[in-house]
Amino acid sequence: MTNDDSLPKDKGFDRSLQMLKEGYTFIRNRENKYHSPVFETKLLGEKTYCMVGEEAAKVFYDNGKFRRQDAAPKAVEKTLFGEGGVQGLDGEDHRQRKEMFMSLMTKDSLDDIQSITTGVWKKYVNRWKDREKVTLYDESKKMMAETALTWAGIPFEEKDVDEWAKELSDLFEKAADVSISHFLSRRSRSKAEAWIEELVDEIRKGERKVRETTPLFKVSFHKDKNGELLELHTAAVEILNLIRPITAVSVYITFLGLALHDFPVAAEEVKEGGEEERKRFIQEVRRYYPFFPFVIARVDKDFTYHGASFEEGTLTLLDLYGTNHHPDSWSKPDSFQPDRFHNWFGSPFDFIPQGGGDHEKGHRCAGEWITLRILNESLRVLTDSITYHLPEQNLKYELNDIPSLPKSGIELEYVKKKG
């Protein structure tokens, strides 16, 4: 028996539909209502703790208190993460799998993906010169899918890029959808997994040659703690866990375009500056705009936090967007201020757009450095390499849409190379 009398309780039989209605603001709305960074509610028919803020994140990423195994709803596993992926592992299994991902984040590998990004942008800009109008989000999905496939070493035909972009974006665009779109997302995952399983099998049998330095080769021959190759399905899931998030960087690229429009003073500083100014602008885009709303775990052992007992096995959500906007950590959190990242020495728990904690041993996204490299090159192109015009359009984005995106996708007219 646990004593949760001091923990605020969100009224209502089940708040799942309300969460979908409120989206990114669901947890912060209740923090403000109950004046507490943690409260209890019911989601998907079960008792759930919700947390927000830097101190809550420190607790949430304590591997002695929380586990990821059996935390994500099956609907999310079957779309966003895949079954058997690193996001649902704990302990030695997680450490060893995470080590595999971290081994792919070498300087040479990061230089490689930045170079690929440069080449892909050049190719697409050359195409745009013959078009009156392009939609940045739609084009970014294709660019990022092509970048991801090339970097990972996955063979593809140029004519198939559009299909890859659609299937990979289905995995994050429709994962939270409760309509028929969710089943389209599951179908896209099943199709992609089946193809990659076949590919990995051919590589292992020596029927298909790929460079040994590629992520595709390394994941194909990665061995678990027992010295066994990953099951074909698991290998396919983890390869998708490399190329899906890279494709999702298209969301951030779209918000780069929006920020350059919405905040002209900051945009001018970037255009007149260099690497450091781009870095600050990118980090503020990642903090300010919505990306992934929250992360999920289960209490692994009973413990007490904020005067309340957390019971083993209870589902727990940490608010990423809310923590990135929390007034305890950020001055004027709802203002776009890239200079806040000048000589910034924050903790791994207050700035958590792609998860928090330690990259090496914890659950912070291993691909965060890839994101930064891609965004650095994308912002350089948008500010230094091309000119364009933004026609009148609906640039509004809603925080109850997951993922949230500008309604128009950012339409660009008359894109031309500078010089």
Image (cartoon, grey):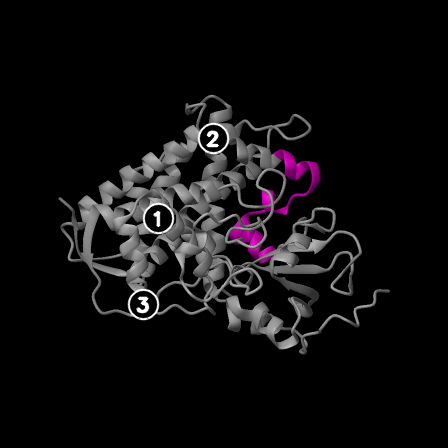
- The disc labelled 1 sits on which kind of residue? Glu
On the image, the x and y values in percent for residue 108 come to: 42, 28
- The disc labelled 3 sits on which kind of residue? Leu
On the image, the x and y values in percent for residue 353 come to: 50, 54
Is residue 146 located in the magenta-colored stretch of the structure? no
Residue appearing at x 46%, y 41% in the figure: 369
- Residue stretch in magenta: 74-96
- Which residue lies under the disc numbered 3? 395
Mark 3 neighbour class, 10 Å CA radius: few under 14, some 14 to 19, many 20 or more: some
Is residue 80 located in the magenta-colored stretch of the structure? yes
- Which residue lies under the disc numbered 1? 277
Is residue 167 visible in the rendered image? The answer is: no
Local SS, label 1: helix
On the image, the x and y values in percent for residue 283 come to: 43, 51
Rendered view: 104 above or below 366: above
Secondary structure mostly taken by the magenta-highlighted segment of the chain: helix
